[in-house]
Image: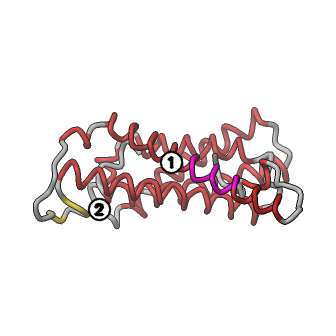
Amino acid sequence: MVAATTLKNGVALSLAMAVVLVPTVILSLILRQKLRFPYWLGTPVWTMAAMFLASLSYYVIRFVSVEITDSLGIYLYLLASAAVVSAVFTGKRISTIPAAGAWALRYSAGFAMAALIISAIREVLAYGTLWSVALPEPFRLEGAAMPFFGFIMFGVFSAGYQWIRRLVAERRQARAEAAGEEPLGPAEEGGGLPV
């Protein structure tokens, strides 16, 4: 989210995340569970695949803006490493290719939602624009373009997500108890979304 200083960057990062994450998660599942690759061999294979896909994502994100890859810099490849980490940590819970694809799409959608909201807020505050269109009477906060502001916003959004998730789980549990059902365990109440 640090590179998401404008809405265009947020859209580009979201597209790149989907392009990299979905095939990487599916590849890691195939290598680990279907072909029985050991971790020491499979991890470098899907890491190289993720980096290759990050390079290919340029051809998707350039339609957002031609200069977008210059402004994203190394963050595009850091995004690929995040996809590798996600693939490693989800492989034990997911056992079918459709489930892996569905999980990766949900993860990409959540990432896109956060990236688009954070990048839109940062662009409005830092530059007084939205999708490079000047806003009337903009409120400017120069620090909003700095990396630390992206980290702070990501922390605030993460805390908000965890708070909402806890509230939903508490309400589900209260409804289940009121109906006389057995309360859901932690694995069932998360809905398979990334923590």
Q: Position of residue 33 (x, y in %)?
A: 84, 50
Q: Quadrant of the N terminus?
A: top left
Depth check, front residue: 71 or 14: 14
Q: Secondary structure at mark 1?
A: helix
Q: Residues within 10 Å of mark 2 (few under 14, many from 20)?
A: few
Q: Residues within 10 Å of mark 1 (few under 14, many from 20)?
A: few
The image quarter in which residue 115 lies = bottom left
Relative to 60, say whether 40 is above or below: above
Label 2 or label 1, whichever lies nearer to me, is: 1
Q: Which mark is residue 136?
A: none
Q: Secondary structure at mark 2?
A: loop
From which residue to which does the magenta span run? 163-170
Query: Are the residues flagged by discs 2 and 1 in contact, CB closer than 8 Å?
Result: no
Task: Identify the residue at the far front of this view.
Answer: 178
Of mark 2 and mark 1, the one earlier in the sequence is 2
Depth check, front residue: 53 or 84: 84
Q: Residue at x 52, y 43 (%)?
A: 159
The image quarter in which residue 137 lies = bottom left
Depth check, front residue: 51 or 100: 100
In the image, what residue type sits under mark 1? Gly
What residue would you read off at disc 2? Answer: 65
In the image, what residue type sits under mark 2? Ser
Q: Position of residue 154 (x, y in %)?
A: 44, 43
Q: Which mark is residue 160?
A: 1
Q: Residue at x 79, y 55 (%)?
A: 188
